[in-house]
Amino acid sequence: MRLAVAVVAVVSLGVTAPVPAGQEPVGPRTVAPGFSVRPDGVLDIGPIWAEVNHYDAGWTIAQQHDRFRRDPTPPVPVSPRRGAAPTEVIRGELTTARGPARLVERIEPAGGGIRYSVVFSSARPLPTNELAAAFLLPLSAFAGKTLRLDGRPLVLPAAPRPRGQARILVKKNVREVILPMPTGALIVTGNFNFLVQDDREWGDERYSMRLHFSPDSGRISTSRIDLRLTLDRARR
């Protein structure tokens, strides 16, 4: 289950223009203050980056940053009103160990943040142990920090977990997660099963927080996740 280490993109607070029809996006696009999306659909939120992860029945992982190929000609984003940031729609193919799947990702600016949704689909059911939006939390920013799950505190251990005990918490039917950020807090709301683990067991200096699609395991033909992400700069 080892995840590849990636360099976090710097988040710009400006609003970029839509990509003209027929042109490929070449870099991250700011979709709301504090939120940017890379051409492959990976989200950057300050020190956090988030992407779709699929684990097959043998725990072989397909990660969005590595195994996703965006359709050659993305649709032109449209603004719901003059001066608003465009809604980003990203379509393409995620190559899993058991065959291809389609991803349709939609990122829409919403007051103080974004609405984030992804639909996962396959022409034939794909054996799946886990399907999630994985939020990757670097130790440098989150070691020893306290998250809140539906109001209850969860401390991320500063010391590495004992070998074989990487999972910190698994919880079903979570509605809200609050993460401390360098300036304020990130509030994630939805309805999802939750898992967080310490990836130092596999040599990665971070925690993996996974918010599961529905359905999140079994033989999956269609699944989705819908989240609201808000940056509250006044909250500590």
Image (cartoon, rainbow, N blue to C red):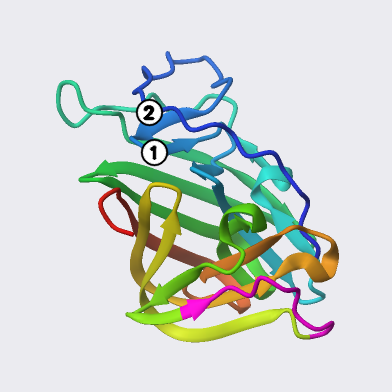
What's the residue at 70%, 71% (across, down)? 198
Q: Which mark is residue 13?
A: 2
What's the residue at 38%, 47% (across, down)? 183
163 in the magenta segment: yes
What residue range appears in magenta? 154-164
Image coordinates of residue 175 in percent, x first then y, are 34, 76
> Does residue 213 show up?
no
Q: Which mark is residue 34?
A: 1
The residue closer to the viewer here, 161 or 13, is 161
Considering only vertical position in the picture, is 22 above or below 32?
A: above
Name the chief secondary structure element in magenta: loop
Considering only vertical position in the picture, is 49 above or below 120?
A: above
Instruction: Tell me the quarter of the image containing the N terminus.
Output: bottom right
Which amino acid lies under the numbered mark 1 shown in the image of this protein?
A: Gly
What's the residue at 84%, 82% (across, down)? 163
Residue 152, quarter of the rendered image: bottom left
How many numbered discs, if any?
2
Image coordinates of residue 160 in percent, x first then y, are 76, 74
Query: Decide: marks 1, 2 in contact (CB < 8 A)?
Result: yes
6 in the magenta segment: no
Relative to 169, 66 lies left or right: right
Task: Say which element carries label 1.
Answer: loop
Instruction: Tell me the quarter of the image containing the C terminus.
Output: bottom left
Considering only vertical position in the picture, is 105 above or below 120?
A: above
Task: Say which element carries label 2.
Answer: loop
Relative to 80, 36 lies left or right: right
Residue 108, quarter of the rendered image: top left
Crowd around label 2: few <14 · some 14–19 · many ≥20 (10 Å) = some
What's the residue at 72%, 47% (across, down)? 67
Considering only vertical position in the picture, is 99 above or below 17?
A: below
Q: CA distance from mark 1 to mark 2?
A: 6 Å
